Amino acid sequence: MTTENICEYLRKEAVNQLFAMNSFNNSWPSWESVISERINHLSATNVVDLGDNLADIFKLTGVAGRTQSDVSGAGNAWEALVCWYLNLCLIGSRTVVVKQKKSLIPEPIRQSLTVSYGSFPSGTESDLIAITFPNKPDYLEDKHGITIRDNEGSLIPTSVGRNSKFNYKPLVDALFERDFSDCEIGVIQCKTNWNDNAQIPMLWDMIYASRGFRRHSISVGTSTFSIDDLDKFTYSFVTVPTVDRSGINSNSTCVKRVQNLSGGNYWGHASIPSVANSLKDIFGRNFSSASSESLIRRLNSELEKLSGDYSYFNLNNDN
């Protein structure tokens, strides 16, 4: 029986939920064909370099129109493709990228990211949340070997129900409550357009950096969990973009608005200095502590399991 730690369990759940989305699943056959072609020989370098081409891959299915439904569907597909790519490059590490969903996000993390305007709680504009689990045995060893108690002192079972389903949410909530200060969180906002949306991550990053504005009764986190207590917090922006890149330079307003984001500004193309970094550059900047091994060494080792443990990525590459 193959063992699985809680990090890889969450990664599998996060990726499986991407394929449950119509916008992602319907686009996948076209994307997968080109991804397999671009990887050619399955190696860590070729997989990571997909970050230089992710925009071109996305545009294979593109934006059919400019109605609100079209834009929303394209946005969902882009953030799902980004989530798929990031998790593929992070297999075997302690960092997992998930779309915001209450059943997957540990409660302490959700509370720490809550922005309240007076008594009204509001979630961040984030599309994706990168969680770097602490470097401790409970997160590295078999998930069924986790031993932790709830707030009433009772041992939390690792399996529940007739089908012995892994008891993820109670376990991860208790673990993160205990180890909150050893966690790293990265908020990643994904948008297909750049010009229309650059001010959104700029303003959210300002709110998180300032930890709120007392004068306007805006606060970040709760009395129990605050991003101040995390080991590391970053805010990033990832765009296609759908606008013509030739008209974007270091002096463009959209560039200026996101140039100082704590987690960096990225797009689905090769890096252009002072404009945007390739999405592949996010690993060294934000997730360097996710593994004791280098990105390339770890990924080369883990890719050998792509047809087995990681078959849920649905990447049919026989090279």
Image (tube, rainbow, N blue to C red):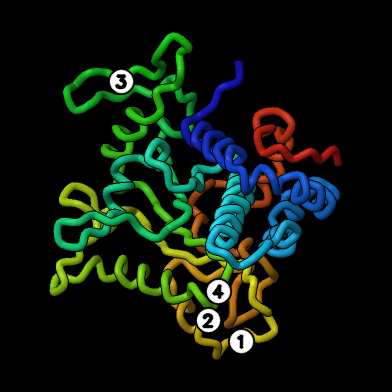
Q: First in sequence: mark 2 or mark 1? A: 1
Q: Dot 4 lies on which element?
A: loop
Q: Disc 4 marks which residue?
A: 194
Q: First in sequence: mark 4 or mark 3? A: 3
Q: Dot 3 lies on which element?
A: loop
Q: Disc 2 marks which residue?
A: 255
Q: Disc 1 marks which residue?
A: 249
Give, as a three-letter code, the residue at label 3.
Ile
Q: Is residue 281 above or below residue 109?
A: below
**Horizontal placement of 101 versus 266: left or right?**
left
Q: Disc 3 marks which residue?
A: 156
Q: First in sequence: mark 1 or mark 4? A: 4
**Quadrant position of the N terminus in the picture:** top right
Q: First in sequence: mark 3 or mark 1? A: 3
Report how far apart the C-alphas of labels 4 and 3 lie in the structure.
Answer: 45 Å
Say if residue 92 shows up in the picture. Answer: no
Which x, y percent locates residue 289?
48, 52
Mark 2 in CB contact with mark 1 (< 8 angstroms): yes
Q: First in sequence: mark 2 or mark 3? A: 3
Label 3 CA crowd tier, 10 Å (few <14, some 14–19, many 20+):
some
**Quadrant position of the C terminus in the picture:** top right
Of tags 4 and 3, the one toward the viewer is 4
Give, as a three-letter code, the residue at label 1.
Asn
